[in-house]
Amino acid sequence: MRILMVSSEMTPFAKVGGLADVVAALSYELARKGHEVKVVLPLYGSISPERHWKALPDPLLVPFGTGPQFGRVWETTGGLPNLHFYFLEHNHYFQRAGVYGDAGEGYPDNDERFLFLSKGGLALCHYWQWYPEVINVHDWPTAVIPVLLNTVEKQGPLGRAASVLTIHNMEHQGYFPASFMDLAGLPREEFRGDSLESYGQVNLLKGGLYHATKLTTVSPQYSREILSPPESCGLETVLRFRSADLIGVLNGVDTETWNPATDPLLPAKYDADNLQGKKVCKRVLQEEIGLEVRPEVPVFGVVSRFASQKGLDLLVNILPWVLREMDVQFALLGSGDPRLEAGFREVARLFPGKVGLGVGYNNQLAHRIEAGSDFFVMPSRFEPCGLNQMYSMLYGSLPLVRDTGGLHDTVEQYREGAGEADIGTGFVFQEASENALYYTIGWACATWYDRPDDIQKLIRRAMTRDFSWGPSVERYEQIYQWAQAARGG
């Protein structure tokens, strides 16, 4: 198939969350299976064209309802002959420090920025006279594309393309003034409750949900949760209306990048049959992040965006009590909510040697926390899929998670004293509360000290789970075929 991906993020070029990892892995896996895949991305200020990239000879004209915009297009390959990346250069829109905004605030012209990306992806198809059978768009920044396919592009060659909207997170929906309709050159009749209109404004995600041929989410459990509040984030009506076309597909992980037996970012390699290297990784992590070097103490790792969605307000509130009452250590890495950053800094100050903190993005440290920690904490209020719990299991760091979304689909509850096949892979709690998190950390800690044989069985069971992209890509291929058939009908 000819497949166009249009996304606001993709690893390694621009990453805010798991969306970037998914777009990268899915694109590569589809190309490896023989599909022709083109990926369109913004050229953010953090991305510099490399020497082997080529600029298209002509500027790209992107039609806006208020007048055309122009940009340069850079092309590079993904190392496969049928995988190409295209970066839209528009300095006014993308030469900025952030992807979506600065200091927790979205840029006020995000409607224009991501409309340029969305319409630019379609304009490239016309420029090449290359028309995909399926266009896969991701979250609100590119959710207007299905609307455009059903309206302004309907009678042209792109009108035959099926659209698949992948929902990575319902929380962010893309609300903008009604003037967006004129900016995008969309028919005014689409400004209605069963299309783009919501509370007198344009809601891009809502429009995409109504117009896309098929809808996917990033885990089966999340596809069920978003049909009702609070996970529906106010869009339960449209999601229930489209439920027959809504399919949950669990994300895979890049098992070449995330493999403790080959990971070049680790000080020592290891696998499920030989964990000596994991002991080295733990010692090096303790040294590097400022923890006391004590191999007998369990290290709890966190690599996350610092946000209440991730439940990290629960963690920062109970950490002083955990550290006073349990012999444990914490290695934390992330950034986000300034109040949470300040809270974790204060806990690290109060408990030197017991809490190590890195603020910001540090890929090497993220890998080393996964490898060097014994447990990995994800107390999310909601988690569409989550990737870190899967990385953790592959690295033998036992996940401690709330029972929601993709965490529900991937982490098997610990069963004390069971055989290795039935013992589970982690520690799961139900309620998003400080008490539930506190007692689950205590449960993991007690297991570490009192039942070390169970810990070893849990690690072996976790490290042998299959989280590769193979089954997920087969499911996406099937969904693309369904979408094609539906569009043709």
Image (tube, rainbow, N blue to C red):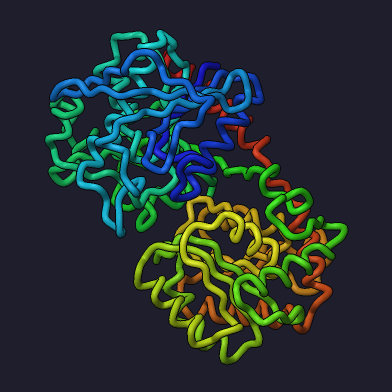
Q: Position of residue 227 (x, y in %)?
A: 40, 48
In the rendered image, the quadrant that contains the C terminus is top left
Q: Nearer the viewer, residue 30 or 451?
A: 30
Using the image, determine if residue 9 lies above or below residue 307.
above
Residue that extends furthest to the bottom in the rendered view of this protein: 325
* Residue in the picture at 60% in, 82% down: 354
Q: Is residue 33 visible?
A: yes
Using the rendered view, name the quadrant where residue 72 is placed.
top left
Q: Position of residue 175 (x, y in %)?
A: 23, 45
* Residue in the picture at 23% in, 38% down: 111
Residue that extends furthest to the right in the rendered view of this protein: 273
* Residue in the picture at 53% in, 28% down: 479
Q: Horizontal placement of 356 versus 102: left or right?
A: right
Q: Is residue 244 visible?
A: no
* Residue in the picture at 63% in, 64% down: 369
Q: Nearer the viewer, residue 291 or 32?
A: 291
Q: Nearer the viewer, residue 347 or 402?
A: 347
Using the image, determine if residue 310 lies above or below residue 453.
above
Residue that extends furthest to the front in the rendered view of this protein: 51
In the rendered image, the quadrant that contains the N terminus is top right
Using the rendered view, name the quadrant where residue 43 is placed.
top left
Q: How many numbered badges does the structure rendering display?
A: 0
Using the image, determine if residue 395 lies above or below residue 296.
above
Q: Position of residue 321 (x, y in %)?
A: 52, 88
Q: Horizontal placement of 63 versus 7: left or right?
A: left
